[in-house]
Amino acid sequence: MKLENVFLSASSVKEADGRTISLGIPAYTLMGNAANEVYGCINNRQINTSSVVILCGRGGNGGDGYALACLMLRDGINVRVVYISPPKNEDSAKYADEYREKGGILLKYSENPDGVADEVTNATLVVDALHGVGYAGELKGEELILVELANSSDGFLLAVDIPTGISADGRVSANCIMADLTVTFSVHKEATISYPALGYCGEVVVADIGIPEEILRSIRPKGCIIEEDILNYLPARPPNSNKGTFGTLLALMGSPNMPGAAYLSAMGALRSGVGLLKLTADNETLSILKTRLAEPVFVPFSKDMLNEQKYSAFLVGCGIGSRYDNCLDEVLKKQNQITIIDADGINYLATHINVLMEMQGEVILTPHPGEMARLIGEDIEYVNRNRIECARAFAMEFCCVLVLKGKNTVVASPNGDVFVNTTGNTSLSKGGSGDVLAGVIASLAAQGITPLKAACIGVYVHGRAADNLKERFGVRGMLPQDLPAEIGRLLG
């Protein structure tokens, strides 16, 4: 486990801090280390420090801010500390006293609100050290005013550990610091890798402040970031092989008005290495697809046909509309192979969730936020505010692999493990991109890769292909049909 690839919950971060302090490393030292790391980021990026305002809270995050103010004062930087209340713990108070004793200027908001407003809005750098990982709730009163002032400043806005208004677990309050840079400590938190919270963080840097690695490794992470090494799980393709070696995918997809969904999904599957693709649909849809695809075996759909076919994975849903709703119950319940359900297959499950509970084989679902909302009976806003928890809870309840698509796609497993993908860009925000992804994941599953790894590999290469193609087509010009060939190249 690479620490740079994991993220912890707020409670786990506090546990790591507490265990570090119990080893004899005081909070005062950790605050000093944090300040040094933040100062290093400021210097490395050559951020304008001709006028600096540091907003300091009462807790440990404020202590980091006071410690940073001491470093800047030492180097002759024009720095001001703005606070609402004095520090509530001894270690933070030590840095506040040190700053004051060295001639540092402290501005209490309530004593000079107009003067503070001028300082903040005219600063070239505003540092947010109001709240750290312990924040929860909604901002109000003077804190809310300071956040609004910081956001209105033309200066660079840097958040210490977590932007104020956001919890480490990704909850976003009505008003938040909109940082240009967030220097978070020790490891990622959910807020620094998952939207919507990540949208307030700007650039994220993870800084080592001296918490022992063995402590961090001993704590079960809340989740992991999918990295390139996920490709190491691709099995070798032996030279003495045939199409049967690499699995057979049976796919029920497409309809007369949406044959493109089937085409894109088929190309995603074929380019990802499946040995044989059997494409089933109504005769009209098949007649259209036969003019575009040379590789699949085309099988007219019937319920009895499923009993006659041999396959290692089953994909259903891309572009089928509601034409199979009268038989999907039976089709899905009889599957004992890995089943990948996308698009209209998910819409069917949203009103027939009992079917998912009665399926025999392993299942991968690939909803976008709207489909996820229908599955759980919530609105899209709720899903987007709680992406990781929505995915995790559903995967555990229904014993499936859940791929919640969107920026930084979330993959959740039946045992509660969560993986977040950071590849991809807005070129994927086009109809058809999800069909390609479903085909890729289904192809990998048909080749014998476990559902969780197939999903993680699929979302990684899907996003990585889009990142590569952006250089050629731009984010506006890339089309979903451009993806399969690049995905095939990446998979090798």
Image (cartoon, rainbow, N blue to C red):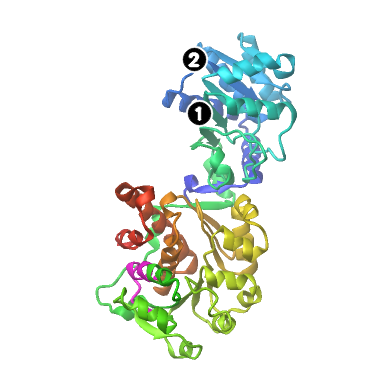
Q: Which mark is residue 116?
A: none
Q: In terms of depth relative to the viewer, which is nearer, 213 or 8?
A: 8
| Disc 2 residue crowd, few under 14, some 14–19, many 20+, Cα 10 Å | few
Residue 38 position, x and y percent, is 51, 28
Magenta residues, start to end: 266-279
Q: Nearer the viewer, mark 2 or mark 1?
A: 2
The residue shown at (56%, 24%) is 153
Q: Is residue 425 visible?
A: no
- The amino acid marked with disc number 1 is Glu
Distance between mark 2 and mark 1 Cα atoms: 20 Å
**Quadrant of the rendered structure where residue 201 is?**
top right
Q: Classify mark 2: helix, strand or loop.
A: loop
The residue shown at (46%, 69%) is 450
Q: Is residue 239 placed above or below 20 in the rendered structure?
A: below
Residue 333 position, x and y percent, is 58, 82
- The amino acid marked with disc number 2 is Ser
Q: Is residue 10 magenta?
A: no
For mark 2, what is the residue?
50
For mark 1, what is the residue?
37
